[in-house]
Amino acid sequence: LERLTNPTYLADLTTARVAMFANELRKPYTITRGIGKKQTKRIVQRTEASVAKHLRHLKAVARWAHRQGLLSKLPTFDMPKKASGATRMKGRPITGEEFDRMLEVVPKVVGEVAAESWRLLLQGLWASGLRLGEALAMRWERKPGSPSVILNGKKSVLAFDADSQKSGKVELVPLAPEAVQLLEPLQRSSGYVFAVPRDVRKVSKVITAIGKQAMVVVDQERGKFASAHDLRRSFGFRWSRRVNYQLLKQLMRHASISTTLTYYANQGAEASAAELWSVLGNTLGNTPTQPVTSRAVETWNFS
């Protein structure tokens, strides 16, 4: 805010300056990387979601200052409106083959000594659908502020208190069978489930480096490699093919069913469409090359 709008006093945080800040955030800017001859420059532009994130933080600070009597008049925040229709994911679900490639290259990124711990973290994210911060905070025992895993066969659950998840709710969530099978042989009485650093940013960068080393590109247009959140997307996509969306909402711990439908209903439809062609090909031995007519459909054997 200081860099883009140059306020002098706290009282300068007015509605007009907030609007100026939002306009400045929307302008393209240059990112410079590297040194000397290896230096590269790239012009980028913040998304509306990024603008909204900055404004939310500023709004929270302004409200606090107003409650404390430090800011006499609370400015108005004109928040960016969410785009109607489906929101574009910043990545995509990765395939089983791509995940195997990521596991294979782990030692090249973190070294042989630490490889086992990092592989377990990747497998945990893949099998549980946890957000990265939740996985790093996950403990074997119940402890305030940390989610915990309660293993009890088919009744295994993840336990969240108000401070341990994004929604701020106290919640017990079913643990997916694949996660139960992964964690049961490793069960301990206490401590963190995953023996890696607790710094979310650093761990996130390492996982992205693993995705890059494995050449798993999840967004060709942006040149984005697989990240921790793409493992969560993969979990959501796999289970969207197995359970109804109410149960998927519970597994993903979305605050609203509309979030679940926005991100996974369309993908499920596309996968179903592809599956229809696969079934047809298996039935006929090949796919039809002639235009499909009602008479042709009558002669196909779908038994």
Image (cartoon, rainbow, N blue to C red):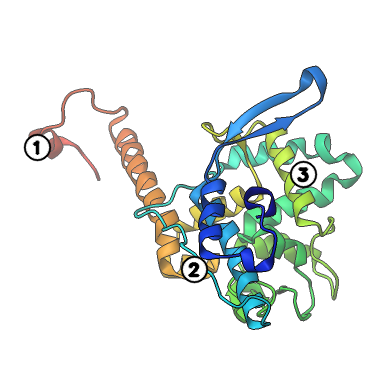
Q: Which residue is mark 1?
A: 294
- Callout 1: SS: helix
> For the residues marked 1 and 3, what is the alpha-carbon distance in whole angstroms?
54 Å
Is residue 151 toward the left or the right of residue 176 in the image? right
Number of residues whose C-alpha sits closer than 10 Å to that of mark 3, classed few (under 14), some (14–19) or many (20 or more)? some
Q: In this picture, is 230 found above or below 151?
A: above
| Residue 70, image x, y percentages | 68, 77
Front residue of 2/294: it is: 2
Number of residues whose C-alpha sits closer than 10 Å to that of mark 2, classed few (under 14), some (14–19) or many (20 or more)? few
Instruction: Tell which circle, 1 or 3, labels the residue nearer the N-terminal end.
Output: 3
Q: Are marks 2 and 1 in contact (CB under 8 Å)?
A: no
Nearer the observer: mark 1 or 3; the answer is 3
Residue at the outermost top position: 37
For the N terminus, the image quarter is bottom right
| Residue 101, image x, y percentages | 68, 36
Q: Which residue is mark 3?
A: 206
Q: Are marks 1 and 3 in contact (CB under 8 Å)?
A: no
Q: Are marks 3 and 2 in contact (CB under 8 Å)?
A: no
Is residue 14 toward the left or the right of residue 150 in the image? left
| Residue 164, image x, y percentages | 69, 73
For the C terminus, the image quarter is top left
Front residue of 55/106: it is: 55
Number of residues whose C-alpha sits closer than 10 Å to that of mark 1, classed few (under 14), some (14–19) or many (20 or more)? few
Q: Residue at x 60, y 75 (%)?
A: 63
Query: Amino acid under label 1?
Result: Ser
Q: Residue at x 53, y 31 (%)?
A: 220
Q: Which residue is mark 2?
A: 76
